[in-house]
Amino acid sequence: MEFPKIEHIKDKLEQDYRSVWSGPDAKINLIASPYRISPLGAHIDHQGGSVLGMTINSYTVLAFTSTRDGMVRLRSQNYPGLVEFSLSGIPQVPGSFWGSYVRGAALALKEKYSLELGVQGLVSGMLPGCGLSSSASVLLAYLHALAFVNGITLDPWDLVRLTQLAENKHIGLNNGILDQTSIVFGQVKSMVHIDTITPKAEILPDPLDEQGYRILVAYSGYSRELTTTGYNSRVRECKEAAEMLGKLANIPGAAKLGDIPTDVFDKYKDALPGHLQRRALHFFSESSRVKEGVAAWQEGRLRDFGRLMSQSCKSSIEQYECGSQAIHDLHQIVMSEQGVLGSRFSGGGYGGCVVGLVEEEYAGQAAAQVEEAYCSRHPEVANQAKVYLASSANGVSPL
C-alpha cells in the first residue's frame, strides 16, 4: 500500500476545515510536517551519539487560521474532543493527551516570544503514535502555525531547539534532537547525518537516486506514548552508566555516554552493573554502526546498510532491552520475506512500526505478505495494522 499523495490530503483537509469551523471565509493556511525514519542511530541521540534520519511521504497536516482573541482552538481527525485555551493563560492540563502538544509548543514559544494571536485549526495525521516521530511532527506543525500568525521568524535550529524544549520541559519526554532535526532538514532522495553535539545536520544525497529499493513501513497496530513507556527510564539508565564510568576514569562532569571515550568504556565496563553495561554497550556499538552506515550509504552498498539496520535492531532487543512481543514478531516477519535487506524498530520500540529496506522488485510482494502474516499472528489488531511502501520527502513546510 502506498501513502496517499499530499495534494489529495491538502484538498480534503481544506474542505473538512470549512465543515468543522463555521464563520468568515478566511484564507486557510496549511503546514505539512512529515514523519521520519531513523535507519541507524537507535536510542543514542539523547546521549550525544550521531544518528541518521530520513523524512518520508507520510505526514501530519495542519489547516489553520489566526484568532484575534488569542485563543487556541483545535480539532483532530484522529482523536476526539476540542482543545481550547487562551495564550494569556495556558492551562497546566490541556484537557486531553493530544492537546499537550499544542500546549507544549505554545509554552516553548512564549519563553522567548510574545504571542498575541492564536490559531484555530484542524489537524490530521496519517499514522499518529506509530513510532515515526509523529509527536515531533505535530509539534513542528504547531510551532510553524503559531510563529506564522504572530509574525515570528524562526530559523531551522530555532525550530529544533523549541521542539526539544517543548518535549523535555512541557511534555515530559527526555529525548534528544534526532526527530525534529530530521524533520526540519529532511530532503527528498537524501539521508540526514546528525551530529547531536555540535549540533550539525549534513545532507547525504542518495547515490542510487532512490532506484532499486523501497522503504517498507509496517505498523503494528499498537500505538504508544513514549512518556508512558520505559523510554525515560532507559535514558536515565544511560546517564547512570555515564556517571559511573566518569567517576571510575576521573572524567569530571560526565553526564552522558557521549562524554565517555570508547577506550574508557572498554577498560571499565566490567565494573558496571549488568543492565547499565548493556545500555552502554548498545550506545558504543550503535555509534560504530552509524559511522559504518554513513560510508555504506554514500557508496550505495545497500546490503551492508541493511545488515547494519538488523544489527541495530538486535542490539535494541538484547542490550537496550526495549520492544514488545508484537514488535519483535513483526520484525521477524519482515526479515523472513524475500528481498528484505534489513529492518529495525522505529521509535521507542514499545509499539509502533518496523521499518525495512527491501529490494524494489520484491517490495509489493513483501508488503502484502508481511501484513497477512502479522495479522494472522496478531488478529487482535488486524483492523489497525497496515504495511506501506514509502518514499523520501522534503522536510516540514507550508503547502
Image (cartoon, grey):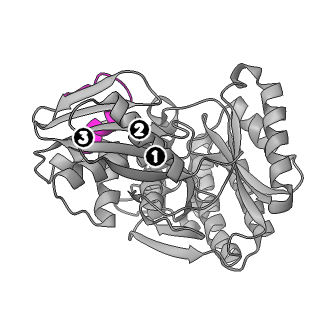
The answer to whether one can see residue 235 in this image is no
The magenta segment is 91-105
Q: Residue at x 42, y 47 (%)?
A: 136
Element type at mark 2: helix
Q: Residue at x 28, y 40 (%)?
A: 104
Q: Residue at x 52, y 65 (%)?
A: 50
Closer to the camera, 223 or 173?
Answer: 223
Element type at mark 1: helix
Is disc 3 in contact with disc 2, using a CB cutoff of under 8 Å?
no
Residue 297 appears at what percent x and percent y?
68, 73
Mark 2 surroundings: few (<14), some (14-19) or many (≥20) residues within 10 A: few
- Image quarter in which the N terminus is found: top right
Q: Which residue is mark 1?
A: 11
Residue 137 appears at what percent x and percent y?
43, 48
- Mark 2 is on which residue type? Gln
Mark 1 surroundings: few (<14), some (14-19) or many (≥20) residues within 10 A: few
| Furthest-front residue in this view | 25
Closer to the camera, 378 or 259?
Answer: 378
In space, the residues marked 3 and 2 are separated at their CA atoms by 12 Å
- Image quarter in which the C terminus is found: bottom left
Q: Which residue is mark 2?
A: 15
Is 25 in the magenta?
no
Element type at mark 3: loop
- Mark 3 is on which residue type? Asp
Quadrant of the image occupied by residue 265: bottom right
Q: Which residue is mark 3?
A: 25
